[in-house]
Every structure is written in structure tokens, then in C-alpha cells.
Amino acid sequence: MTLTSSLNREAACGQHWDALVIGAGPAGAVAARQLAQQKLRTLLVERKTFPRYKVCGCCLNQRAINALQQIGLGQLLESAGAVPINQFRMQYQGRKTAVALPGGLAISREVFDTRLVESAIDAGAEFLQDTTAIVVGSSEKRSSRTVELNYQGHFAGSVSAKIVLAADGLGHPSLQNCSGFDMQVASDSRIGVGAAFAVKNHTSYPPGMIHMAIHRSGYVGLVRVEGENLNLAAAIDRAFIKQCAGPAAAVLQILRESGSPVLPEMTESSFKGTLPVTRKTLRPVGDRLFVLGDAAGYLEPFTGEGMANAITEGMAVAQLVPEGIRHWDSALEQKWLNAHYALTDGRLFWCRWLARLLRSPTAVGWGLRLFHLFPGMARPIVARLNH
Ligand SMILES: Cc1cc2nc3c(=O)[nH]c(=O)nc-3n(C[C@H](O)[C@H](O)[C@H](O)COP(=O)(O)OP(=O)(O)OC[C@H]3O[C@@H](n4cnc5c(N)ncnc54)[C@H](O)[C@@H]3O)c2cc1C
């Protein structure tokens, strides 16, 4: 499964685009698809070569699945071999408890993101990978924005578009030269760590179950994705990673102390890290520029909200772009801020509440005991997070 660019950098620079989307994660790919479906000339630029690995728990909650179904992409998950999840198992200091999950699917980001980009190309979007996009600070012409394209660290040309969408993930690197997109990073933010392993005949982490190893300094989630692969994703305190002398040792220690099985593959694997994850962009909109998905803000991996937010924001922003092409003003900027906060803010309360609880060993200990004795107590929490 490889993906090739649908045009080269020279051809991309020679055209004037209605919309230029930076970043081919779920936010960017969905936005590009929805824009191309409206017959807008859309360029999707990605700095990596697809399929690419991305640190992620790889679990789509029901909200994400519903959103994909709404735009006619429900079949994509089934045909890609996404694994249905029906159980959530937590393990802390040797104590285990499991609750039923009302729905959800596990799929590797290599496969999921590639399929989404293919759907954008099928809809008529042009795709250019291996290319880093940097938005030029101020627009020379009020009717468009300029974006620089770089290849292997060198300038490769400029491209202009009536509207730019920054969907480039945590830290929005494409906006490094633009002012007004300051980020607030939580001082106690954890770092994401991930790895993937090919596993065969391992019974410790069976398909259909999310296993969460909980520790006072973080948690490690494991889930089987398509094709006999096991995905690992963790959120860990920065101080603990330092104390353990690296992310791999920190992950293994969390697994061991929680009583979760450590597979031989895990000790041999290389782990990847992220920036501190809990952050938000104070104003995710600027002149002819929308910021969406993780680039606009992200809270905590545990709640599995990230991809649902990215997909629904990709859908929502695509409805505003035609208006922005006709006429950009502060009323439109406010519309995006309203849409962004409506999609994220109501849910933040729950995510924050759960994230805080998880940082308290006493609360986790009591929570697990209660859920073990009265599994029904966990249902409303799980249902709230899943929808
Ligand atoms: C440990 C961990 C576990 C998680 N688990 C889950 C989970 O189970 N379920 C869930 O829903 N969410 C989960 N998330 C969150 C989820 O991964 C993100 O919310 C989601 O990927 C956001 O999508 P996005 O499209 O906004 O950004 P991304 O998926 O990060 O995509 C951004 C893309 O932009 C590209 N890019 C960056 N800079 C440039 C540039 N200058 N030019 C061109 N391209 C660029 C990147 O290469 C990348 O492909 C987890 C996150 C972490 C850290």
C-alpha cells in the first residue's frame, strides 16, 4: 500500500488554488475531500511519505465513525479491515477491571490516513507529499495567501491560494513565521509515546479490547489493529521519562508496575515521541487562514477524542471556505471560532475531569474497585466519551 503524489511541486507552484490544505491527517484529508467535492481547486500538502506512522491509540470512537458515515465514508473502515472494539480493560497495580464498550473501531494510522487521502484524491483534490509547507507571514495581496514549499530542507517554490487551512497537527509547524497563533501549553502536559508491533498468537492482548495500563506518571494503551498488529500509545509525564532515561524504559516500567504483560517484541522495538500534547491555539483563525484539528488544540489522549474532533472540524471548515473565497471578513472568522468551540468546548469539560482523575492514584484505585463491583457505574462515563 503506497501512495504517490498526484502532481509534482513545479505543477503545484504554477497554479492558483482555491484552497491549500496543509497536513494529510484526518482533519486535512477530510477537509480536502469535502472541498474538492464542492468543485473547489484544492491542493493537499503533506511533509511525510504516505503511508506514515503516527503516534496514536488508533481507536475511532462512535462519534468519529458516525461522522465518517455522514459523509459517505463508512465503508472505508470496513474495507480497510478496522477491528471492532467491544471491551475496555484497565489495569493498575495488578488490579484489573473491564467494562463493555458500546462501539468503536481500531485501525492503524498508516492505513486509515492513507485511505482518507485516497478518498480526497478520488473527489478531485491534488495531493503533494514529501513537501513541507510554511505559510508566509503576511498576505501580499488581500485576495490570497502565499505558502512556501520546501523539499528536504530546501526552498522548492511558492504557491498561492485564496484560503489556507493549517491542519498540520500538534504545534502547527507551518505557522512558525506567522504572528497571532500563540499556543498555550499546559505546564503539566504529558508527552505522547508510541510504537507498533507485528504479533502472532499472543493471547495477552486479544483483538476487540483496549487494554489500558495505568500508573501515577501516565498510562499505556494497547489495541490490536488490522493485520495481526498491536498498537501501543502512551501519555507519560516528562519528569518520569527523564527519570527512566527514555520513553521506551518509561513505557515498560508502567506496564510492569501495572501488572500488564510485556511482550518480547516490546523490548526490541523503537518508540517515537510527540511534543507535549495538552495545548491550545488561542485564536485558531487569521487572515484567509483556518486552523483545525490538533493544530488548533488538543487535550489528552485517554479520552480518544482526537480523531473525532479532527474529522468533524474538517467537515465544518469545508462549509465556510466557499464564503471565504467570495469575501473574507471578521464575521467569517467569528463563525469559525464559534464552530470550533461548539465542536470542542462542550466536550472539554468531560475530558479535563477524567484527565484530572487519572492523575490521582487514590481516585484510580477506588474507581477500579467500584467499576469492578458495579460495572454499570462505568457505562455512563464510557457512553459520554464515546458519543
Ligand atoms: C499518545 C496518543 C494517543 C492517541 N490516541 C488516540 C485515539 O485512540 N483515538 C483518537 O481519536 N485520537 C487519539 N489521539 C489523538 C490523534 O492522534 C490526533 O488528535 C489526530 O491525529 C489529529 O489529527 P490531525 O489531522 O489534526 O493531525 P495529524 O494526524 O497530526 O496530522 C497532521 C499532518 O500534518 C503533517 N504536517 C505537519 N507539518 C507539516 C507541514 N509544515 N507541511 C506539510 N505537512 C505537515 C504531518 O506530517 C501529519 O501527517 C492520540 C494522540 C496521542 C499523542
Image: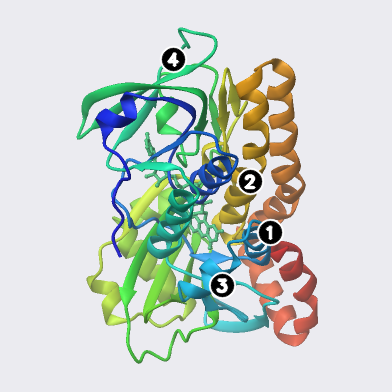
Hey, what amino acid is under mark 3? Leu
Nearest to N terminus: mark 2 or mark 3? 3
Name the residue carrying label 3.
105
Give the residue number, with chain letter if any, for mark 4: 137
Residue closer to the observer: 361 or 121: 121
Q: Which marked residue is nearer to the observer: mark 4 or mark 2?
A: 2
| Badge 2 density bin: few <14, some 14–19, many ≥20, Cα 10 Å | many
Q: Residue at x 32, y 82 (%)?
A: 199
Disc 2 to disc 3, C-alpha distance:
20 Å
Q: Nearer the viewer, residue 317 or 120?
A: 120
From the viewer's perspective, tell me whether residue 336 is left or right of residue 295.
right
What label does residue 315 carry, if any?
A: 2
Which of the two discs, 3 and 1, labels the residue nearer the N terminus?
1
Q: Residue most toward the front?
A: 39
Q: CA distance from mark 4 to mark 1?
A: 36 Å
As drawn, 334 above or below 108: above
Say which of 11 and 83 sits in front: 11
Question: Mark 1 — residue?
Answer: 70
Question: CB of mark 4 within 8 Å of CB of mark 2?
Answer: no
